[in-house]
Image (cartoon, rainbow, N blue to C red):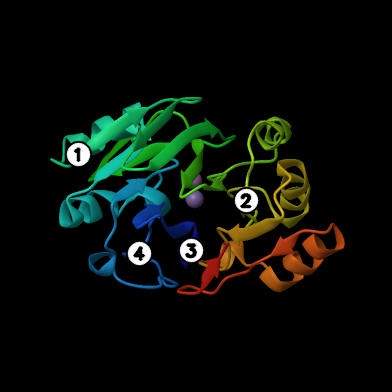
Amino acid sequence: MRITFLGHSGLLVEAGGKRVAIDPFLTGNPMAAMRAEQLKVDGVVLTHGHGDHASDAAKIAAECGCRIVAAVELAGILARKGVQTVGMNLGGTYEWDGIRVKLTPALHSSSYEDGDQVLYAGPACGALLTIGGKTLYHTGDTALFSDLKLIGERHRIDVAALPIGDHFTMGPDDALDAAAWIGAKRVIPLHYDTFPMIRQDGAAFAARLAERGIDGYPLKPGETLTIE
Ligand code: NI
Ligand code: MN
């Protein structure tokens, strides 16, 4: 599995000949790894409706002719834009073309800004993405919550990607415990440095992970982590 950091909370995951983007936020992202038009994928997975996660999804899905997998309310909003969507809810699993997505709880909020309207977008989620026998757990935006331990116990997670930016999500102290509870050997920090309010030291976070025997990968936008 190859995981490329798109900036902010966006990941491009490639395995088994498939390419899936999770939370691609490229337009208006000062740290974006590429333009939305350059992202060629077989699917888009969204953890929730906030603009820094979902605002490019319809454009990408339209360009690529691929489906968007998201909470049923968010999927419904995006379906009205004429793109193919698959609406799910927490705990559900959906599989297509060798790509498996399970939505997990996240402790956050979710809404979708559509013009001057703010629409209810369902629950905030995390996503377990399994392709080619490897599983990535993207926690979505979340606070620390104890069921991260349960999710870690019940799934074989090869790599976890979680927010460390603080202010809108958990910060590094809580993310450190989240990483340990999830039990993944590899952790990619997300949702930091994009804007001044969420400035964090990714290298320092990785050093603290190392003290707990976890490999941290503070990827720069465009950088790739390969898991054998
Ligand atoms: Ni959010
Ligand atoms: Mn966010």
Which mark sits nearer the N-terminus, 3 or 4? 3
Q: Residue farthest to the left?
A: 82
Residue 2 numbered mark, or none: 3
Q: Which of marks 3 and 4 is in front?
A: 3
Q: Which element is circle 4 on?
A: loop
Q: Mark 2 points at which residue?
A: 158
In the rendered view, would you say 102 is above or below 34? Answer: above
Residue 84 numbered mark, or none: 1
| Residue 64: image location, x then y, percent | 19, 56
Circle 1: residue type: Gln
Q: Dot 3, crowdedness within 10 Å: few (<14), some or many (≥20)?
A: some
Would you say 225 lies left or right of 151 here?
left
Residue 26 numbered mark, or none: 4
The C terminus sits in image quarter: bottom right
Residue 171 numbered mark, or none: none
Circle 2: residue type: Asp
Residue in the image at 20% along x and 35% along y? 79
Circle 3: residue type: Arg
